[in-house]
Image: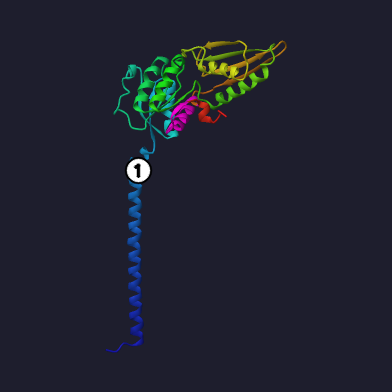
Amino acid sequence: MRLTTADTESTEKVTRHAASESRWTASAISVASVVDSLRDVRFSVVKSPRARLMFSPLLIVGDGRMGRLVAALAPEHGFEVAGRLTHENNTGGHALVAGRWPDGTVAIDFSTADAVADNLPRLARLGFNAVVGTTGWQGREAELRRVVGGAGIGVVVAPNFSLGVNVFEAIVAHAAARFAPHAEYGAWIHELHHAAKRDAPSGTALALRSALAHGGYARAVDVASTRAGSIPGTHTVGFDGPAETITLTHEARDRATFARGALVAARWVIGRRGWFTMKDVLGLTG
């Protein structure tokens, strides 16, 4: 059988068309496979607990206003709330037992002064780092420092976790150094908080008094407290002379600033050992 030029060209066209269709079919199959793969990946990301595993477990000790704020803001700071302990379910710290909480848990304690003495040693035995924002227990600080040191955990302790207050303390210490040589200037502190706050003076007021002493102001400092309404926290340090008064004031407008600071401290203390303050967290110790 003889093939003409026309027959040859026709055969080549058919061959090219078949090859083209084959390539398009292969491409379509390949694209479909990629799409299916991407769909599988998308669904696996949605369904997989991997995203949750990226969050660190957080144990909230205390279910007051601060505890509830910490719980609400925890996801923004990379934490997943593993549990919330209250006076009812953690009397004497009995809920802090091995095997109940995930490894690597970090605790934030906004409970009561008496509860801190129960909770912190138990957290130490579990190897859980902690952030303590409760005040009024400082009479037992030396004892708790020994417990923390012996367990090799990291703890951030602060009467106030706001960035502003910690910078404010540094400003107060600087002012104290300037007024210390002038005996005619007396210093005073006035703090105001909501009616439900139990300890007075506040832990922040005591820290400000220490800042005055650290700055070299060795004279007596009068500290006054007011408890009324829903005041989140206002602290004023004053220097009064024969013909003038200088006042420095920090006023918190929202308790969320304390909760955010505590969560920043909780993220910072992961993997650390020792007894720290918010100044360590913020790099204000230099």
Q: 216 or 184, which lies in front?
A: 216
* Rendered view: 121 above or below 24: above
Could you tell me residue 45's position as x and y percent? 35, 45
Count the marks: how many? 1
Identify the residue at the far left of this view.
Answer: 1
Is there any visible trace of residue 21 in the rendered image?
yes
Which residue is at 61% across, 16% downward? 237
Side (left or right) of 203 relative to 67: right
* Rendered view: 139 above or below 167: above
What colour scheme was applied to this rendering of the protein?
rainbow
Q: How crowded is mark 1: few (under 14 residues within 10 Å), some or many (20 or more)?
A: few
Is there any visible trace of residue 110 in the rendered image?
no
**Principal secondary structure, stretch drawn in magenta:** helix
Side (left or right) of 257 relative to 114: right
Check the picture and name the quadrant holding the N terminus: bottom left
Region of the chain picked out in magenta, as a range: 257-275
Could you tell me residue 275's position as x and y percent? 46, 25
Q: 30 or 57, which lies in front?
A: 57
Residue tagged 1: 46
Residue type marked 1? Val
Which residue is at 62% across, 11% downward? 219
Residue at disc 1, secondary structure: helix
Q: Does the magenta stretch include residue 165?
A: no
Which residue is at 35% across, 66% downward? 24
Could you tell me residue 76's position as x and y percent? 44, 34
Identify the residue at the far bottom of this view.
Answer: 2
Q: 285 or 119, which lies in front?
A: 285
